[in-house]
Image (spheres, rainbow, N blue to C red):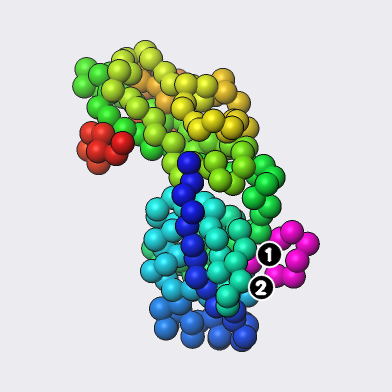
């Protein structure tokens, strides 16, 4: 469940590219708050602050602007050319008493028996779409793969989510499955000219273990 996270921001008096670039040189990031039939507000916050929320998986933020607070959700993030630095962000005002639709990242945890046996883990989904109250939005959804063997799969319906959260993504969709290496080779041969884009193979060591509760 989402914990209460606060984003402290200031109103931007000067708009435009030149003013935004000046903010970035000062270690700040320009953003916009909009929605709920209210006027948009141009804001800025520190690069460290917004980056911490994004990489922390925080979706819902209590945005404090010059003493006032609004409940918001991160709606859009614009990155630099190299996808390293946040250049701009959008926050959407939400009613905490109404359900929202939000995409939540899937986080693989554990060592798959199937991968240990030589199989290839193919991840079909990296996030799922949920509907729930803002206070119930999970930061991330853990997918435990320890007991997944060759030939096994995990569906959206197999995922654990907090009470009051429902899936918008069809529950019959496959999150991941493990296949024999020969199955991937056969798919490549059947594709013909140029072959298909190779399925993404997951088996990174940083996903191993179960350090989080």
Q: Are marks 1 and 2 in contact (CB under 8 Å)?
A: yes
Disc sitting over residue 34 in the figure:
1
Q: Secondary structure at mark 2?
A: strand
User: Is residue 30 in view from this perspective?
Assistant: no
Residue at position x 47%, y 21% in the image: 158
Residue at 48% in and 46% down: 2
Vertical order, 95 against 49 (above or below)? above
Residue bearing the label numbered 2:
41
Does 98 sit above or below residue 71?
above
- Residue 72: horizontal and vertical position, in percent? 60, 58
Please tell me how crowded label 1 is: few (under 14), some (14-19), or many (20+) other residues with Cα within 10 Å. some
Q: What is the span of residues highlighted in magenta in the rendered image? A: 33-41
Percent from the top left, x then y, of residue 21?
50, 82
Image coordinates of residue 186 in percent, x first then y, are 38, 18
- The reply to whether the magenta stretch includes residue 39 is yes
Q: Secondary structure at mark 1?
A: strand
Residue farthest top in this picture: 151
Q: Name the image quarter holding residue 190.
A: top left
Instruction: Tell whether position 129 is magenta.
Output: no
Say the numbered circle drawn on residue 22: none
All told, the count of numbered labels is: 2
Q: Point out the tag, 1 or 2, that comes first from the N-terminus.
A: 1
Q: Main secondary structure of the magenta part?
A: strand
Q: Residue at x 49, y 85 (%)?
A: 22
- Given residues 53 and 195, the one toward you in this image is 53
Q: Is residue 111 left or right of residue 191?
A: left
- Which quarter of the figure is the C terminus placed in? top left
Which residue is at 74% across, 59% downward? 36
Q: Tell which of 7 and 113 is nearer to you.
A: 7
Residue 95: % across, % down:
68, 52
Q: Quadrant of residue 74?
A: bottom right
């Amino acid at each position: 469940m989402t914990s209460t996270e606060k984003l402290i921001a200031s109103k931007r008096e000067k708009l435009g590219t030149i003013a935004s670039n000046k903010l970035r040189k000062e270690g700040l990031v320009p953003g916009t708050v909009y929605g709920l039939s209210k006027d948009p507000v141009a804001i800025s916050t520190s690069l460290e602050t917004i980056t911490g929320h994004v990489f922390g998986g925080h979706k819902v933020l209590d945005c404090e602007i010059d003493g006032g607070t609004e409940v918001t959700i991160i709606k859009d993030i614009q990155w630099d050319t190299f996808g390293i630095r946040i250049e701009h962000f959008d926050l959407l005002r939400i009613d905490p008493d109404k359900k929202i639709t939000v995409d939540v990242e899937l986080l693989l945890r554990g060592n798959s028996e199937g991968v240990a046996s030589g199989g290839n883990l193919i991840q079909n989904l990296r996030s799922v779409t949920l509907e729930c109250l803002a206070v119930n939005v999970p930061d991330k959804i853990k997918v435990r793969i320890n007991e997944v063997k060759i030939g096994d799969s995990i569906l959206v319906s197999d995922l654990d989510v907090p009470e009051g959260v429902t899936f918008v993504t069809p529950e019959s969709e496959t999150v991941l499955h493990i296949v024999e290496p020969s199955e991937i080779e056969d798919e490549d041969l059947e594709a013909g000219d140029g072959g298909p884009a190779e399925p993404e193979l997951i088996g990174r060591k940083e996903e191993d273990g179960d350090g989080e509760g």
